[in-house]
Amino acid sequence: MKITEVEAVYPRYRQVAPSWRTHFWQIAVRLRSDTGHEGWGYGGGGVAAVEVVNRHMRELLLGKSVDSADDIAALWDLLYRQSLPYGRSGVAVMGLSGVDLALWDLLGKAEGKSVCDLLGGVKRPKVRAYATGMDLAWYRDLGFDAQKAPVSQADEAQVVAWAEKARGLFGPDALLMADCYMAWDSATCLRMAEALEGYGIHWFEDLLLPDDVEGLAALRPKLKPIQLAGGEHDFTHYGFAALARTGALDIWQPDLTWCGGLTAGLRIAELAVEHDVPLVPHRGGEVWGLHLLAAGYGEDLGELVMGRRDADRDVLWLDEPGPVEGCLAVGAAPGFGVRVNEAML
Ligand SMILES: [Mg+2]
């Protein structure tokens, strides 16, 4: 089939708190083919990525054939190369991610197969999910036994109080993680690790700054047994190959809607195996990462940003699988198996 239409859209969000997310949060990308199929993808980079897709990538894609994963990989390489003078990472690759995921969705729809089936079929009928947020009792009621606390605003006493409560609620075998979102320096990381000794924290996420790879590599052995996780601000297999050489991270967390889509995710997964680094995609419990995990790539652990039980939230993708007893399963519907919420476009 040939691509006949490419359009990126910045959805109308109601619930995005004022921050960089106001104009630079997630985008939707729609592709159409001459066979009448439609593919949807999810990217980052907001209004800037919309411009990248609609004013540049679109003209490169129109008329191109998509009949296999190899065709998608070739288109990825083309878009990466052509956007390289202003791209390589950041907004351009976030736009490319949306296009790439839409290409996979389109191929799945045309072949009547789920993306997981395109990747070889379901190897994990149930993917263990972890809940990100602080509504601990709700996550326990939903059957989660893995939780990550956003702790960038918390002081030491609050972080310890969280660990105490979470360990009590979820039990001795639960996975507990803390995400400081670049708010801690090395001294704070070490102080927190000491304060949390005995709580069996699985990983600390997003420490220092992602560009401070030397600082991260120096810190990593000192935090043991806590693992140092990161990578949501890193891009493409080239970026992760460079990271691998630094030894900065114990666990890689590429975001498939930012790092270059599923095509980049597959290449990063190959590198992760080569370097023996666990791969736990950022927001990997959303369908864009879940199909990769269900197909047996990476670790058996998918993130769901759950927030609070009573929160009113934007739902851009309909029919997305939710957690059942703390696990997620991909459906058999073609592509990623979700529909866009037209009311938000
Ligand atoms: Mg994070």
Image (tube, grey):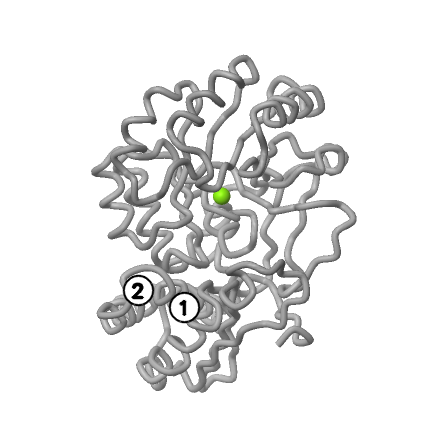
Q: Nearer the viewer, mark 1 or mark 2?
A: 1
Residue in front for this viewpoint, 226 or 4: 226
| Residue 181 vertical placement versus 21 (above, below) | above
Quarter of the picture containing the N terminus is bottom left
Quarter of the picture containing the C terminus is bottom right
| Residue 345 vertical placement versus 166 (above, below) | below
- The residue singled out by tag 1 in the image is 95
- The residue singled out by tag 2 in the image is 73
The amino acid on which the numbered mark 1 sits, given as a three-letter code, is Gly
Q: Position of residue 14 (x, y in %)?
A: 68, 66
For this view, does 222 lie left or right of residue 149? left
* Sequence-earlier tag: 1 or 2: 2
Work out whether residue 128 can be spotted. Answer: no
Residue in front for this viewpoint, 39 or 241: 241
Residue at position x 47%, y 84% in the image: 35
Q: Position of residue 112 (x, y in %)?
A: 53, 68
For this view, does 36 lie left or right of residue 220? right
Residue at position x 44%, y 27% in the image: 188
